């Protein structure tokens, strides 16, 4: 048995019950004891949370089911891409400096750096889906 909570920031949380407690009473007890903050809202009981591959911050509750919010997934994807990009940009910066020192052409390096910067813009495409976001990578 699970209890679904909505935090003040909209992020969902799930509490699992491993005994025969009545869910609403168990939820009240958790808040009375301070185990769950008083400003969290009890949204539902006996809810299943299927693994989607997205962080909890990207999930929302529509009153009947948990779903992945596209806008939140875009933010999560941008964050993931920026983490992946950081070492790649550092490597390009090194190549750039080496090319400058040797007097070599830097156009290809500059173009690659711009490509690395621009990939996060792909998340803003109007027709992008959750599946598309999952596939974005460097």
Image (spheres, helix red, strand yellow):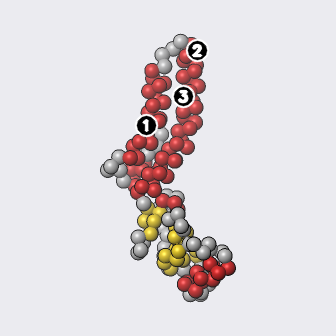
How many residues crowd around disc 2 within 10 Å: few (fewer than 14), some, or many (20 or more)? Answer: few
Which residue is pictured at 51% across the width and 14% down the height? 104
- Residue 39: image location, x then y, percent: 57, 72
> Closer to us: mark 1 or mark 3?
1
Which residue is pictured at 47% across the width and 51% down the height? 75
Above or below — where is 40 with respect to 58?
below
- Residue 101: image location, x then y, percent: 58, 15
Confirm or deny contact between disc 3 and disc 2 (CB under 8 A): no
Residue 27: quadrant of the picture = bottom right
Which residue is pictured at 39% across the width and 43% down the height? 122
Callout 3: SS: helix
Residue 102: quadrant of the picture = top right
Can residue 53 be spotted in the picture? no
Above or below — where is 68 with respect to 78?
below
Above or below — where is 93 with respect to 137?
above
Callout 1: SS: helix
Can residue 31 be spotted in the picture? yes
Confirm or deny contact between disc 2 and disc 1 (CB under 8 A): no
Callout 2: SS: helix
Distance Cα–Cα, label 3 vs label 2: 14 Å
- Residue 20: image location, x then y, percent: 59, 87
How many residues crowd around disc 1 within 10 Å: few (fewer than 14), some, or many (20 or more)? Answer: few
Q: Earlier in the sequence, mark 2 or mark 1?
A: 2
Q: Earlier in the sequence, mark 3 or mark 2?
A: 3
Distance Cα–Cα, label 2 vs label 1: 27 Å
How many residues crowd around disc 3 within 10 Å: few (fewer than 14), some, or many (20 or more)? Answer: some
In the picture of the structure, the residue carrying the numbered disc 3 is 92
In the picture of the structure, the residue carrying the numbered disc 2 is 101
Q: Earlier in the sequence, mark 1 or mark 3?
A: 3
In the picture of the structure, the residue carrying the numbered disc 1 is 118
């Amino acid at each position: 048995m699970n209890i679904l909570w909505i935090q003040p920031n909209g992020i969902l949380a799930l509490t699992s019950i491993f005994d025969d407690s009545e869910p609403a009473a168990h939820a009240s007890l958790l808040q009375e004891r301070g185990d769950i903050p008083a400003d969290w809202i009890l949204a539902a009981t006996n809810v299943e949370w299927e693994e989607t591959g997205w962080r909890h911050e990207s999930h929302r509750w529509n009153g009947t089911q948990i779903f992945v919010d596209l806008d939140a997934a875009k933010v999560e994807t941008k964050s993931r891409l920026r983490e992946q990009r950081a070492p790649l940009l550092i490597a390009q910066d090194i190549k750039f400096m080496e090319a400058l020192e040797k007097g070599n052409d830097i156009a290809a390096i500059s173009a690659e750096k711009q490509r690395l910067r621009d990939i996060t813009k792909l998340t803003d495409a109007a027709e992008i889906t959750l599946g598309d976001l999952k596939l974005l990578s460097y």
